Structure formats: structure tokens, C-alpha cells
């Protein structure tokens, strides 16, 4: 196997393991904050290249406030018209930046960040609950495998917490 295939297989396996633990821990859970904290923890502990892992909550139709996270401190408030997180909230599409210096409006909460992925979490009736943000100090580390698995986790959260009032 080439190195890139090995890395892809390892990633898929690690995501599958993390997903099993998340599903089991959140089985029957109705508290959104507890869920976000648990997902941030499980993902952060699973991947060495995750350096900041957490949530920004959509508290209005144009503003995000930081939620549960792991890693060094992040920005507390982000408007929808700013940064990679704001773009994910505004467009409701995953933002995948293998090199954040290519992202026109990246907000550098930590100067060490090299790559970033942000996935929106929406309910089946199209309400935006939050965005899931992962930053890495490693360049080029996020790819479609991360996107696919993080989108699956985010979709499951949106379904499980469809009745949640954003806090
Ligand atoms: N880089 C993000 C801001 C959030 S933190 O880095 C934790 C952005 O551009 O939206």
C-alpha cells in the first residue's frame, strides 16, 4: 500500500471507532451542550492532527458564539460575515481549507493553525444549530475523508437534536 492509501485507511478506521463511541455515549441523550462537549472530546482525543476541536453555536441569524471545545482558547464571537466559521454558517456548506493562507477571510485565533474544516449542523427542518470547527497545526491534513465523516456526524447531531432551542 502506498503511504497515502495507508493514511486514508487509518483515517477511515479512526473515524469509524470515534463514531461508534459517540453513538454509544449519546444514545438517548437530549442535552445539546452535553452532546457537543462529548463530540468535541471524542474527536479531539482520536486524532493527533486535531489541534482545536469544537463548536460555534448559531445564536441568531447572523452571529456565532463559541460552544464546548478542546484545545487552546478560540475566538468567543464570530459574525456570519467573518471567517471560515462565518462562511460555513452563512452558506450552510462545509468549508475545507487544507491551507488556511488560501482562505480569504480566515480568522487566526491561533497563529499556529495551518488547515481547517468547518461543517454546519442543521436540523431536518433547516434550522442551523451550530458549526463544528476543527483546526490543525499541520498543513494539508484535511481532505474529503474528514469531510465525509464529519458531515455524517453533523447530520446525525442535527437529527438527534432537531427539537433543540439554540442556547
Ligand atoms: N479560524 C476560524 C475561527 C475559529 S478558531 O480558529 C477556533 C475562522 O476563520 O472562522
Image (cartoon, rainbow, N blue to C red):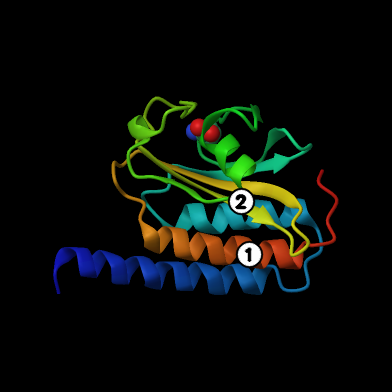
In the picture shown, does residue 71 fall above or below 48?
above
Which secondary structure, mark 2? Answer: strand
User: Residue at 54% across / 61% down in the picture?
Assistant: 151
Q: Is mark 1 within 8 Å of ligand 1?
A: no
User: Residue at 36% across / 29% down in the picture?
Assistant: 112
Q: How many marks?
A: 2
CA neighbours of label 1 inside 10 A, class few (<14), some (14 to 19), many (20+): some
Q: Position of residue 93 (x, y in %)?
A: 55, 51
How far apart marks 2 and 1 lie (CA) works out to: 9 Å
**What residue does disc 1 label?**
155
* Upstream in sequence: badge 2 or badge 1: 2
User: Residue at 57% across / 43% down in the picture?
Assistant: 88
Mark 2 in CB contact with mark 1 (< 8 angstroms): no
Q: Position of residue 135 (x, y in %)?
A: 44, 41
Q: Position of residue 148 (x, y in %)?
A: 46, 64
In the picture shown, does residue 119 fall above or below 81?
below
Q: Quadrant of residue 144?
A: bottom left
Q: Is residue 159 left or right of residue 154?
A: right
For the C terminus, give its image quadrant: top right
Toward the left, the furthest residue is 2
**What residue does disc 2 label?**
120
Q: Position of residue 101 (x, y in %)?
A: 34, 30
Q: Nearer the viewer, residue 83 or 10?
A: 83
Q: Nearer the viewer, residue 49 or 127?
A: 127
CA neighbours of label 2 inside 10 A, class few (<14), some (14 to 19), many (20+): many
Which secondary structure, mark 1? Answer: helix
In the picture shown, does residue 19 fall above or below 50?
below
For the N terminus, give its image quadrant: bottom left
User: Residue at 47% across / 27% down in the picture?
Assistant: 105
Q: Is residue 26 left or right of residue 47?
A: right
Disc number for residue 66: none
Amino acid at each position: 500500500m502506498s503511504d497515502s492509501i495507508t493514511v486514508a485507511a487509518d483515517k477511515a478506521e479512526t473515524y469509524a471507532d470515534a463514531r461508534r463511541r459517540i453513538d454509544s455515549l449519546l444514545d438517548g441523550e437530549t442535552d445539546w451542550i452535553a452532546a457537543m462537549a462529548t463530540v468535541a472530546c471524542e474527536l479531539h482525543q482520536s486524532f493527533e492532527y486535531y489541534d482545536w476541536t469544537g463548536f460555534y453555536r448559531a445564536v441568531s441569524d447572523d452571529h456565532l458564539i463559541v460552544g464546548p471545545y478542546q484545545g487552546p482558547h478560540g475566538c468567543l464571537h464570530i459574525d456570519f460575515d467573518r471567517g471560515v466559521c462565518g462562511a460555513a454558517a452563512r452558506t450552510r456548506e462545509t468549508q475545507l481549507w487544507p491551507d488556511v493562507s488560501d482562505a480569504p477571510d480566515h480568522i487566526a485565533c491561533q497563529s499556529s493553525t495551518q488547515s481547517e474544516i468547518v461543517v454546519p449542523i442543521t436540523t431536518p427542518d433547516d434550522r442551523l444549530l451550530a458549526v463544528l470547527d476543527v483546526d490543525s497545526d499541520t498543513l494539508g491534513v484535511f481532505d474529503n475523508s474528514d469531510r465525509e465523516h464529519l458531515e455524517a456526524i453533523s447530520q446525525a447531531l442535527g437529527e438527534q437534536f432537531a427539537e433543540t432551542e439554540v442556547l
